[in-house]
């Protein structure tokens, strides 16, 4: 990081963003728990959390965090801001441990660390996005065959997850809910970029809201965000927050970078060494995710005392008499 005041401002905004977003997971889960005690749980399709102030405090915290993150990019380069998003994982995990009493096992901590390292590696070596001068240019990139195929695949996968896997495995497999949020999120970010470009150019005097493309991207952002919020609530209401946070971060970051590479064709400007480094980052992420899944409940399991049954007593007595 440079010593310029802009970089310092961007750093402070990025860290603040991670604190607000990390806190939002915990505050929202507190609201979901309170709502579950008085009404139908979000994991069962209920929406009682909408009447719970704590859930709204969590939403406000997340919105403030996202705004701070967006503002950070105006002051500091992406290579500084994006990796700092991993701090939200650590922050939410620590808060979950002390506030929600969701203990994270030693191997879970290791898995979390691997996720952070892998994600940071990918982000640091990810190709730079091209400079976009018009929302029409984004529309041209979004309607090219490569990204259209990716979008169709995402729509099909999300539909299969929602209509087939959610009713059968949603309550037992974290990957179902988080997969929906992450896949949808990759499309959301591409559309958010288009809308942010439109707003920036409009503020500079080039009105982009006269084009239907701007409104189309805006509608996609709203729809995808509502879908993500719904299934993220279900994930938080069903599974350990200390596991939801890193897995969601890892999958969301990975799919977003992948979508960006397809849409903006940025691998064309990279050499084999850079691409290999990014692949190693993906392998590291997969290793961390595996550890998190395998140890997600180990920190909360009580130590079980051995239980002796009557047959065990009779067997031990016969052995004793035999001796």
Image: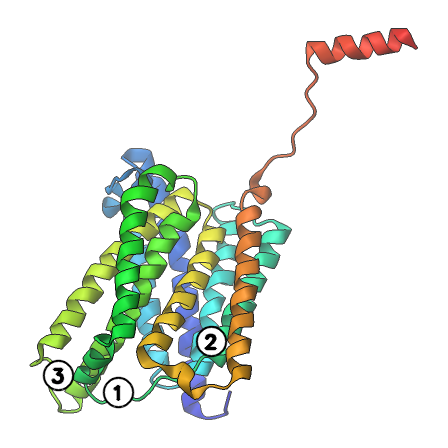
**Which residue of the protein is positioned furthest toward the left in this rendering?**
210
**Residue 24 seen from this side:** yes
133 horizontally vs 322: left or right: left
Whichever of labels 2 and 1 marks the residue nearer the N terminus, that label is: 2
**3D distance between C-alphas at marks 1 and 3:** 13 Å
Q: How did the renderer colour the structure?
A: rainbow
x and y percent of residue 193 in the render?
A: 27, 77
Q: Which residue is mark 3?
A: 208
Q: For the C terminus, which image quadrant?
A: top right
Whichever of labels 1 and 3 marks the residue nearer the N terminus, that label is: 1
Q: Which of the numbered marks, if any, corresponds to residue 132? A: 1
**3D distance between C-alphas at marks 2 and 1:** 20 Å
User: Alpha-carbon neighbours of circle 2 within 10 Å: few (<14), some, or many (≥20)?
Assistant: many
Query: Is residue 247 positioned above or below 163 on the image?
Result: below
Q: Which of the numbered marks, if any, corresponds to residue 123? A: 2
Tell me the mark number nearer the camera, choosing from 1 and 3. 1
Q: Nearer the viewer, residue 270 or 10?
A: 270
- Label 2 SS: helix
- Label 1 SS: loop
């Amino acid at each position: 990081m440079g010593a310029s005041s802009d970089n310092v401002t961007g750093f402070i905004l990025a860290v603040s963003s991670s604190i607000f977003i990390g806190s939002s997971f915990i505050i929202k889960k507190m609201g979901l728990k309170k709502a579950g005690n008085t009404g139908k749980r979000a994991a069962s399709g209920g929406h009682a959390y909408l009447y719970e102030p704590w859930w709204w405090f969590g939403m406000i915290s997340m919105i403030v965090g996202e705004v701070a993150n967006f503002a950070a990019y105006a002051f500091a380069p992406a290579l500084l801001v994006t990796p700092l998003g991993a701090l939200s994982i650590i922050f939410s995990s620590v808060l979950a441990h002390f506030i929600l009493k969701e203990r994270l096992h030693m191997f879970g901590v290791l898995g979390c660390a691997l996720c952070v390292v892998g994600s940071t590696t990918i982000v640091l070596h990810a190709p730079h996005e091209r400079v976009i001068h018009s929302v029409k240019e984004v529309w041209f990139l979004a309607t090219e065959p490569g990204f259209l195929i990716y979008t169709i695949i995402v729509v099909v996968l999300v539909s299969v997850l929602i209509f087939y896997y959610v009713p059968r495995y949603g309550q037992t497999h974290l990957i179902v809910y988080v997969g929906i949020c992450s896949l949808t999120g990759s499309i959301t970010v591409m559309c958010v970029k288009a809308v942010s470009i439109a707003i920036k150019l409009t503020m500079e005097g080039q009105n982009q809201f006269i084009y239907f493309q701007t409104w189309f991207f805006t509608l996609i952002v709203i729809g995808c965000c509502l879908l993500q919020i719904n299934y993220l609530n279900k994930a938080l209401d069903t599974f350990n927050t200390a596991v939801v946070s890193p897995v969601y971060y890892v999958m969301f970051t990975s799919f977003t970078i992948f979508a960006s590479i397809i849409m903006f064709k940025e691998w064309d400007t990279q050499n084999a060494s850079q691409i290999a480094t990014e692949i190693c980052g993906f392998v590291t992420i997969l290793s961390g995710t595996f550890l998190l899944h395998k140890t997600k409940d180990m920190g909360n399991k009580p130590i079980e005392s051995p239980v002796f049954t009557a047959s065990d007593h009779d067997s031990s007595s016969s052995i004793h008499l035999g001796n």
